[in-house]
């Protein structure tokens, strides 16, 4: 009732003309601008003649924050078609948008940006970040998608791709359907096993110009013969890939059978230096050299057989 | 009407107040409000900073947390003092969302709108953007990154999708699709914008994870498997060809496409086939290595017969 008493004391319930307050003004109650029924501590309601709902400008009149009559917000500029339009300068160390919901644990529960369908706010994809001090592992920007195994109102939980710092030679990795820690620049996993995903492409090329290479040494006949022996002695196996679980790698009876080699059985010439992986290009090179050796073998046999036939 | 609500600006017929003015009740202001300026700007509320003002505009919480703060440097902070043009506070590891945008498109909608656009140097020129696509199904939910190229026109947003992160109903449930065309089936699909999987991967090496630690149900393939591999390799029918170009719902001949060498999916043995009517290069290599082993052993047997 104190407000009402004050109102009566002042003998004036309203100022209907233009009013100017040249000093500061303090309003302790709700304030309605353009409305007599404010729904918030401060509500600004447009009239049809207004171009802007709110305009905050610098001493020289430049816009700092604008909300136009369509509800579009401009920061540092007049919004030009986007709901939120942020000004900035290129090539000037400027930062347009800075978000501070980065995670520090592997739960990655907070999102930096959420992409929702329409105004319904459903089927939400998200972009999340992880940060860890003093180490490469644990620093990442990750993309999560919603799919119909989740509730429409629940944030998507499928991690489709992770751009992350890693312990690999290049110190960073693109990890698709991540599982475990990557050790190469591009790792295609399947959400269960590191590197067990598939790549579909028309071709996979390796750069091969002499200019890009040093320490070039052609393989000798003896080394080609070694490739022949190593290829001949490869022990191919069929197996299932395990999946990564809470207690490490565990058998996955539902995984499809695969064919290939076992790292521990394979010769050094086809082993990768990191990650207990085998290098496809080295296997192919060994096979090509083995075929050359075999061809020489056949030529030698043909000569030998001719000699034997000549003796008959 | 709440009794406390009243418009109480100034008492007593005054046209101006030159000291501090306090309104202890509510205030309703029907006309435009100019703060720090007397120049109308067709704005409902116009706040003009003075040169000495550090914060021209701020909306605070009960503990004076700046929910919305506009600094005199033009930087805007949401619940934080801003270190960027727009700086949004948040908390990690707490299911917090810093920024949510609602312009996501429905799958197959023809009128897509960018969720986030990246303009050049204070303009709307040459805008890259991120789109999102949503649908209540297992497949076709995606985040797409489009990069501007001259074809789009300088003032327009990008039209070229470089990468799409998209859910699929096969394989592991999602894929990264480079230069997308068609519906991908592998975890990484590299297309060329024209045909599914018709792109090229450029890398120094491909590796396959091979440690015994990561495998179960291991059984070594024997002589019979090797002999079968030899027969398969011997029976392959290699061809030269060009990939077709997508047109409408099908493919047409593309005489400008490079000639390639390879196999026809329909003609290869089942064991070499991959998802999406593809041929599995890793399995071809396995077959070729095993076939070579058979060949080498036969050669050595002949040598034994021929003698030293």
Image (spheres, coloured by chain):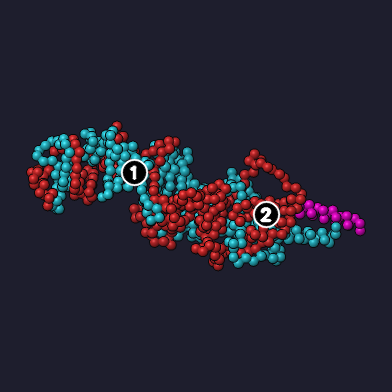
Label 1 neighbour load within 10 Å: few <14, some 14-19, many 20+: many
Front residue of this view, candidates A40 and B201: A40
Question: Residue at left 8%, top 45%?
Answer: A9
Tell me residue B26's x, y (percent). 17, 47
Count of numbered circles in the view: 2
Chain identifier, cyan in the render: B
Give residue B44's quadrant in the image: top left
In magenta segment, residue A307: yes
Secondary structure beneath dot 1 equals loop
Q: Is residue A76 left or right of residue B229?
A: left
Q: Residues within 10 Å of mark 2 (few under 14, many from 20)?
A: few
Q: Which of these two is toward me, B293 or A267?
A: A267
Tag 1 and tag 2 share a subunit: no
Circle 2 is placed at which residue position?
A: A268
Q: Which chain is red?
A: A
Chain for mark 2?
Answer: A
Secondary structure state at the residue bearing disc 2: helix
Residue A189, compared with residue B21, is above or below; it is: below
A300 in magenta: yes
Q: Quadrant of the C terminus of chain B?
A: bottom right
Q: Is residue A162 above or below residue B305?
A: above
Q: Inspect this view and state whether residue B134 appears.
A: no
Q: Which mark is residue B81?
A: 1
């Amino acid at each position: 009732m104190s407000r009402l008493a004050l109102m009566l004391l002042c003998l004036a319930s309203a100022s209907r003309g233009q009013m100017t307050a040249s000093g500061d003004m303090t309003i302790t109650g709700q304030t309605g601008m353009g409305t007599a029924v404010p729904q918030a501590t401060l509500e600004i309601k447009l009239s049809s003649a207004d171009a802007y709902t709110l305009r905050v400008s610098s001493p020289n009149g430049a816009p700092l924050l604008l909300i136009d009559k369509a509800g579009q917000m401009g920061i540092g500029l007049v919004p030009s078609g986007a709901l939120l339009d942020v000004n900035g300068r290129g090539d000037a160390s400027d930062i347009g948008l800075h978000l501070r919901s980065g995670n520090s644990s592997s739960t990655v529960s907070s999102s930096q940006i959420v992409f929702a369908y329409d105004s319904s706010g459903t089927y939400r994809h998200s972009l999340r970040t992880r940060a860890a001090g003093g180490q490469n592992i644990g620093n990442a920007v990750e993309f999560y998608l919603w799919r119909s195994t989740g509730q429409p109102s629940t944030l998507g939980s499928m991690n489709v791709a992770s751009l992350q710092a890693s312990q690999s030679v290049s110190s960073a990795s693109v990890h698709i359907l991540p599982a475990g820690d990557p050790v190469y620049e591009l790792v295609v996993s399947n959400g269960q096993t590191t590197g067990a995903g598939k790549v579909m492409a028309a071709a996979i090329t390796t750069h091969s110009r002499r200019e890009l290479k040093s320490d070039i040494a052609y393989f000798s006949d003896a080394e080609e013969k070694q490739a022949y022996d190593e290829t001949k002695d490869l022990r191919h196996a069929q197996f299932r890939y395990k999946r990564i679980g809470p207690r490490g790698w565990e058998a996955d009876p539902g995984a499809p059978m695969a064919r290939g080699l076992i790292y521990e059985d394979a010769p050094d010439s086809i082993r990768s230096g990191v990650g207990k992986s085998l290098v496809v290009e080295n296997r192919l090179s060994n096979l090509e050299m083995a075929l050359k050796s075999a061809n020489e073998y056949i030529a030698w046999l043909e000569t030998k057989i001719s000699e034997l036939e000549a003796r008959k | 009407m709440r009794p406390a609500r009243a418009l109480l600006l100034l008492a007593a017929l005054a046209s101006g107040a030159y000291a501090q003015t306090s309104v202890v009740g509510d205030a309703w202001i029907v006309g435009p409000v100019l703060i720090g300026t007397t120049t109308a700007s067709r704005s409902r509320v116009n706040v003009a900073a003075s040169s000495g003002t550090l914060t021209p505009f701020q909306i605070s919480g009960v503990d004076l947390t700046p929910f919305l703060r506009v600094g005199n440097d033009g930087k805007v902070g949401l619940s934080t003092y801003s270190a960027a043009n727009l700086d949004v506070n948040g908390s990690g590891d707490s299911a917090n969302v810093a920024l949510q945008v609602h312009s996501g498109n429905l799958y197959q909608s023809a009128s897509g709108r960018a969720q986030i656009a990246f303009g050049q140097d204070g303009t709307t020129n040459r805008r890259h953007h991120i789109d999102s696509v949503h649908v209540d199904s297992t497949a076709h939910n995606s985040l797409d990154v489009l990069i501007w190229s001259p074809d789009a026109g300088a003032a327009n947003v990008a039209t070229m999708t470089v990468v799409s992160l998209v859910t699929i109903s096969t394989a592991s449930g999602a894929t990264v699709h480079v230069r997308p065309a068609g519906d991908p089936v592998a975890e990484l699909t590299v297309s060329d914008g024209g045909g599914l999987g018709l792109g090229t991967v450029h890398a120094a090496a491909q590796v396959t994870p091979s440690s015994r630690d990561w495998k179960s149900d291991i059984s070594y393939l024997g002589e019979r498997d090797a002999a079968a591999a030899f027969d398969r390799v011997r029976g392959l029918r290699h061809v030269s060809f060009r990939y077709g170009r997508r047109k409408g719902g099908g493919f047409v001949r593309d005489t400008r496409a490079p000639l390639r060498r390879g196999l026809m999916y329909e003609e290869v043995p089942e064991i070499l086939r991959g998802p999406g009517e593809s041929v599995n290069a890793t399995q071809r290599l396995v077959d070729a290595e095993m076939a070579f082993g058979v060949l080498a052993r036969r050669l050595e047997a002949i040598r034994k017969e021929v003698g030293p």
